[in-house]
Image: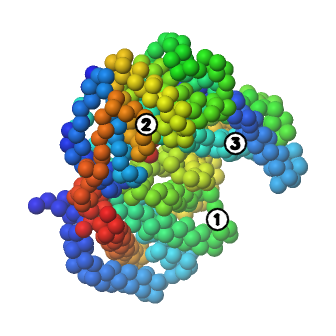
């Protein structure tokens, strides 16, 4: 038996139902630990004061924002090639989580930048790329809602996801090119290349893990809801026909 | 396929408002900007390439939903899909027709509107070059968006939402090309990127658009 | 130049509409697909034309022999009769629209824009398009909607002429086409899908 057996919606519901409680507990543990540790236990940064602690939310949410789209891309390909409904619905559920994560990343990015730059927004490449990603998410979600037939919606949004991914990568390079003259060096540096001392690093890991689990839990819950929705439709159709 | 191109051009011409509407919109946008940002020529001439590009882009958006919707509604799209023409070819021809009726007039009108914005003298050539290179991409990408939303009633707004993020790379390189041309800076990167995007999009996106049309015609 | 359909199932969206459809259409034959609205006549015809995919079963026909005329007439209202027909002639690679114009009595209307034609004239134009394509197997969906009895008679005459010349036609309709004994009738109600089969998309969720 391979992993593909869980492409069957009923089996998926069963497995995810069993796994979800444990996952949720784990998520809460990781998040609470990471956030509490990061916010209350670690000292304030000598340069940025306590505002740097926003990275405990900003970095994980940004990571999820990007990876959620990547997961949607894989799910879209699986749908187009193997026609597994669970895959298509998982992409739909993930997009909802992803768009909120992108929004959180943008807002926390603004909060981080404000004390440092004195403005609530700067068109630096990273933030701008996230803004564009946000628009891609909006388009994807809007397309799902606009189409009645679920299979057609799954097909069209999958193609949009694929084409959008190519353009998203292209936009990243374009935005880097667009902003190369400004803000050099003075921008936020979220990379792990920056020497975050261990004191900050470990709580950050916990937060990242917590957010990943949160994404998993929310996407599973969303997918289950979508599956149940389709079941209800099937039952109604049976009754009618 | 030439027959399809001629037919679409004829239809656009006779539809009344096809040609002129995007030009008028372009003019309106360009006229509104000074009202929004103030009449100072120094400021306007600095941002002129950008305004012209954004105006052209928005004007392109206007006519996107006509590309397929008209044929979809009166059943011609079904007939075209069952004709011995490849759907990818049909999509390309439609994009070309859109460019000829919308993009090309914008390219020609841009220098004239540049006068209103105080576009510096050396900018005229560059705005024409950048728009000429970039507007075909806008048509091809717009055709993809039109194919996605062809079955949706009042899909115009959704179409804009889907297409605008896809327009960003072309806009960035196109406006940058025009800007650098004005300032006399090195234009190699933007011109290569802009041309590259247009060629790649023209070569690859019709396949996606045709696939999407097939899905929508089911 | 025949059309053979065996054990065909067609679906719209996620519902299987018809299953086990089978018939054969040879040259010189006309077939009427009959059934109430919503049964799946249009879906079946569109599947035969290649617009929708086959759920199960087989359709054996050479694609270059078929031409489809949908429910909507596909006539451009701002183009004249001549321009409409010449376009399709070029697309399908045939040369001359003259015979079609003559056969369907459209010579006087040759320069009239499509938007100014009556319903009957539009139908004639639609049929003329089919003739202009030079294809022998005609697939028509509800060809006589909004036609008066005189126009319906004209339509029947034109179909008779087409099959008389060796062509064939399959038409989906729920009204009487006036072809009488010249056309076989296939009632599609017998192929109504009993239970949405497991391939139906929503069913996969139960």
Residue labelled with disc 2:
C177
Are the residues at dot 3 and dot 2 in contact (C-beta closer than 8 Å)? no
Pointer 2 local density, CA inside 10 Å: few below 14, some 14–19, many at least 20:
some
Same-chain status of marks 2 and 1: no
Observer-side mark, 3 or 1, equals: 3
Label 3 to label 2, Cα distance in Å?
49 Å
Disc 1 element = loop
In the rendered image, the vertical position of residue B105 relative to residue C196, given as above or below = above
Residue closer to the observer: A187 or B171: B171
Disc 3 element = helix
Please state the total of marks drawn on the protein image. Answer: 3
Residue closer to the observer: C87 or C108: C108
Residue labelled with disc 3:
B59
Are the residues at dot 2 and dot 1 in contact (C-beta closer than 8 Å)? no
x and y, in percent, of residue A25 in the image: 30, 84
Residue labelled with disc 1:
A121
Q: Which of the chains bears the disc numbered 1?
A: A
Q: Which of the chains bears the disc numbered 2?
A: C
Residue closer to the observer: C59 or B131: C59
Relative horizontal placement of residue C150, taking residue B56 as reference (left or right)? left
């Amino acid at each position: 038996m391979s992993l593909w057996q869980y492409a069957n919606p009923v089996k998926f519901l069963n497995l995810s139902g069993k796994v979800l409680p444990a996952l949720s507990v784990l998520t809460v543990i990781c998040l609470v630990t990471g956030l509490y540790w990061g916010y209350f236990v670690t000292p304030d940064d000598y340069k940025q004061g306590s505002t740097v602690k926003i990275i405990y939310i900003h970095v994980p949410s940004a990571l999820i924002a990007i990876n959620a789209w990547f997961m949607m891309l894989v799910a879209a390909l699986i749908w187009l090639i193997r026609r597994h409904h669970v895959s298509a619905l998982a992409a739909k559920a993930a997009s909802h989580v992803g768009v909120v994560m992108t929004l959180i990343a943008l807002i926390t990015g603004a909060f981080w930048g404000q004390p440092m730059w004195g403005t609530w927004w700067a068109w630096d490449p990273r933030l701008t790329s996230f803004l564009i990603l946000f628009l891609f998410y909006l388009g994807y979600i809007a397309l799902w809602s606009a189409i009645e037939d679920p299979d057609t919606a799954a097909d069209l949004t999958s193609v949009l996801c694929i084409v959008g991914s190519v353009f998203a990568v292209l936009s990243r390079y374009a935005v880097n090119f667009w902003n190369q003259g400004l803000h050099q060096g003075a921008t936020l540096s979220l990379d792990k290349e920056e020497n975050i001392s261990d004191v900050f690093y470990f709580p950050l890991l916990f937060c990242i893990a917590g957010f990943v689990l949160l994404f998993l839990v929310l996407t599973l819950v969303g997918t289950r809801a979508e599956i149940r929705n389709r079941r209800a439709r099937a039952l109604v159709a049976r009754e009618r026909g | 396929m030439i027959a399809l191109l001629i037919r679409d051009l004829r239809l656009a011409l006779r539809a009344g408002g096809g040609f002129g509407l995007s030009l008028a919109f372009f003019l309106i946008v360009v006229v509104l900007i000074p009202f929004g940002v103030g009449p100072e020529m120094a400021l306007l001439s600095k941002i002129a390439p950008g305004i012209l590009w954004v105006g052209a882009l928005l004007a392109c958006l206007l006519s996107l939903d006509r590309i397929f919707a008209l044929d979809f509604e009166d059943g011609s799209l079904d007939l075209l899909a069952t004709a011995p023409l490849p759907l990818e070819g049909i999509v390309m021809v439609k994009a070309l027709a859109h460019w000829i009726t919308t993009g090309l007039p914008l390219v020609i009108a841009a220098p004239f509107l540049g006068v209103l914005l105080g576009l510096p003298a050396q900018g005229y050539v560059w705005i024409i070059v950048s728009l000429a290179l970039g507007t075909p991409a806008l048509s091809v990408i717009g055709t993809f968006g039109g194919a996605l939303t062809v079955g949706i009633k009042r899909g115009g707004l959704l179409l804009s939402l889907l297409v605008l993020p896809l327009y960003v790379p072309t806009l960035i390189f196109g406006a940058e090309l025009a800007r650098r041309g004005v300032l006399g800076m090195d234009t190699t990167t933007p011109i290569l990127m802009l041309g590259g995007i247009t060629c790649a999009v023209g070569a690859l996106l019709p396949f996606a658009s045709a696939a999407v049309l097939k899905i929508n015609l089911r | 130049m025949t059309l053979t359909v065996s054990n065909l199932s067609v679906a719209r969206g996620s519902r299987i509409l018809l299953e086990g459809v089978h018939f054969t259409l040879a040259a010189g034959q006309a077939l009427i697909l009959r059934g109430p609205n919503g049964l799946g006549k249009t879906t079946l015809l569109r599947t035969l034309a290649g617009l929708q995919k086959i759920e199960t079963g087989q359709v054996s026909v050479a694609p270059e022999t078929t031409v489809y005329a949908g429910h909507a007439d596909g006539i451009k209202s701002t183009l004249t009769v001549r321009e409409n027909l010449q376009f399709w002639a070029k697309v399908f690679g045939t040369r001359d629209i003259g015979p079609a114009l003559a056969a369907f009595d459209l010579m006087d209307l040759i320069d009239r824009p499509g938007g100014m034609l009556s319903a009957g004239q539009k139908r004639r134009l639609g049929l003329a398009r089919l003739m202009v394509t030079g294809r022998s197997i005609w697939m028509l969906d509800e060809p006589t909607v909004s036609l008066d009895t005189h126009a319906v008679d004209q339509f029947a005459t034109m179909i008779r002429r087409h099959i008389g010349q060796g062509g064939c036609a399959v038409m989906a309709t729920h009204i009487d086409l006036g072809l009488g004994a010249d056309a076989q009738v296939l009632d599609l109600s017998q192929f109504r899908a009993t239970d949405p089969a497991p391939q139906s998309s929503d069913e996969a969720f139960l």
